[in-house]
Image: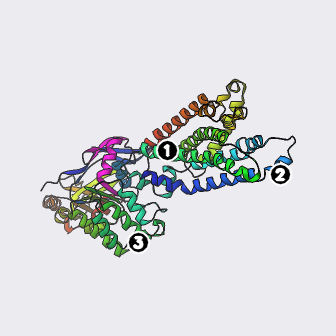
Amino acid sequence: MLWYKMWRESGVRFTISAAALLWMCAMVVLLQRRVRAHADEPISYAHYIWSAVYKANVLDLFVLLVIVLGLGGLLQERAQGTAGFTLSLPVSRWRLTAVRAAMGCLQVAILALLPALLIPLLSPVVGETYSFAPAFQFSVLWADAGMVIFAMALFFSVVLPGAYSAAIASVAALLAYSILADLPPLARYPALDLIETMHGAQLLASRREVSLAALLAPLPWLALGLYALVALCLVGAAGAIMAGKDFP
Amino acid sequence: MAHEPVIETHRLTKHYGKREAVRELSLMVERQRITGFLGRNGAGKSTTLKMLLGMIRPTAGTGRVMGYDIADPAQSVAIRRRIAYVGEDKGLYGYMTVGELICFTRSFYPDWRPDIEARLLKEYQLPPGRKVRALSKGMRTKLALLLALARRPELIMLDEPSEGLDPVSIDELLQTLREARDAGTSVFFSSHQLSEVEQVAERVLMIDRGQLVMNVLLNDLHKHYRHITVEFAGHTPVPAFNLAGVARTRVMGRQARVLASSHVEDIVAYAHSLGAAVQVTPVNLRDVFLDLVKEAP
């Protein structure tokens, strides 16, 4: 039933996030003719989708929504006066953190999957086609990198009191990280650039064969593995801090 | 009859920076008794209860609840499985309905008693479909009690349970605590409402500035504790009453006011031997509380 609690606490945020993401994706698809007509150079529909969804506006929105999903937790509950009840339940704080993280990661994965479902289904309405395969590849990138962003927000929500401090710290940390990743010593390792990895520029050039191998091969698995590890470490650190915290 | 302990602490201490919230507190709460935990605001009652529940880590000392070590996180989970706690703010999830919260809480306790749940739901007139956030404070307290009692815990800890309740609700609450005790549950509750403690508690633990200042059975207090007012004439210096049974002495001018927990006759005889006029009066919990925790003039 901890799952139920975590869902009830984040369900509204998740539903609003999903609606916002779907609305943005739908707008990108439905307004494609007008936007492409004003482009400096003619671009393909696939390239337009990439630049509007996976590289720019929708990605930015996704990142912000993931940060919002990472907020909450016991410090917030303390402010609302319910931490005492939660902490009196016969569950460890590790389990509370783990279930919250698992619910959040699941929600991030579903959010990441939404563009992959909507864009291919909506494209025929505007006389275009967009296959599920590349959309799914981008979803994998977003889900994995999104988990790092979620874990970072969760970490800050455990460390910092106040409703918005974790969100502000997460945005600041992401900006700082993006600047660092562009500096010469780190720029040599593009796999370390989280946002660049989410852009998935290399996927544009990949072949469009319909097979699992062709679907999975172009994905940067090393970077994805690294991000998953970072997310796990952040959740672990959050759990350790939470386990040792006093709730007077 | 000797009552075995459900809670034991030994030199339990909690510091917040330089401030000592609880100082070397050694206490024992007996099984199947109602024990009141008295103290002023900020005396350390809530901190003690939260240390027993694993919400706050002790700085020093040890504590055991139902035999489990309070400082061990795994054993702390076992403690919370066997006991119930009603916090001071009665903070329950406002976004759930009464029914959903009962269902949620029930899932953590295999020993949940649906018959008790149904009885209390009816008795407290709690509407299952209403959101918790829409309940009055009194109703929220009743819901918190239902969640605590519907599995007949071995021990129930309550932090200021009557805070914000009207007199009728307080009366019902005290009755509930008596019934819980009669059903075999040990009750440990903190309060600064002396009349409530006096109505329901069998033993009283009094804490002041983080330290235990009194541990007494209420019957013993009424039977043995006395105020002895000693009036000295002339210019005889008022002596120190360092005698057996003297709990506290206050000197005001030519008068010494002695709170005696025992040996009243010996103290009176000593005062008479000094040529003083002596008056002995019975005490109630309020007198003792004020005597022990009130700042010296």
Of A54 and A173, nearer the camera is: A54
Q: Mark 1 points at which residue?
A: A102
Q: How crowded is mark 3: few (under 14 residues within 10 Å), some or many (20 or more)?
A: some
Task: Tell me the crowding category of disc 1: few under 14, some 14 to 19, or many 20 or more residues within 10 angstroms, Cα based.
Answer: some
The residue wearing badge 3 is: B127
Q: Position of residue B70 (x, y in %)?
A: 32, 44
Q: Is mark 1 on a helix, strand or loop?
A: helix
Q: Residue B168 carries which label?
A: none
The answer to whether residue A169 shows anywhere in this view is yes
Q: Which residues make up the magenta segment?
A: B56-85
Q: Which amino acid does label 2 sit on?
A: Arg
- Residue that extends furthest to the bottom in the rendered view of this protein: B168
Q: In this view, does A112 lie above or below A20?
A: above
Classify mark 2: residues with Cα within 10 Å, few (<14), some (14-19) or many (20+).
Answer: few
Tag 2 residue: A34
Left or right of residue B279, residue A153 in this image: right
Quadrant in which residue B199 is drawn: bottom left
Q: Mark 1 lies on which chain?
A: A
Determine which quarter of the picture holds residue B167.
bottom left
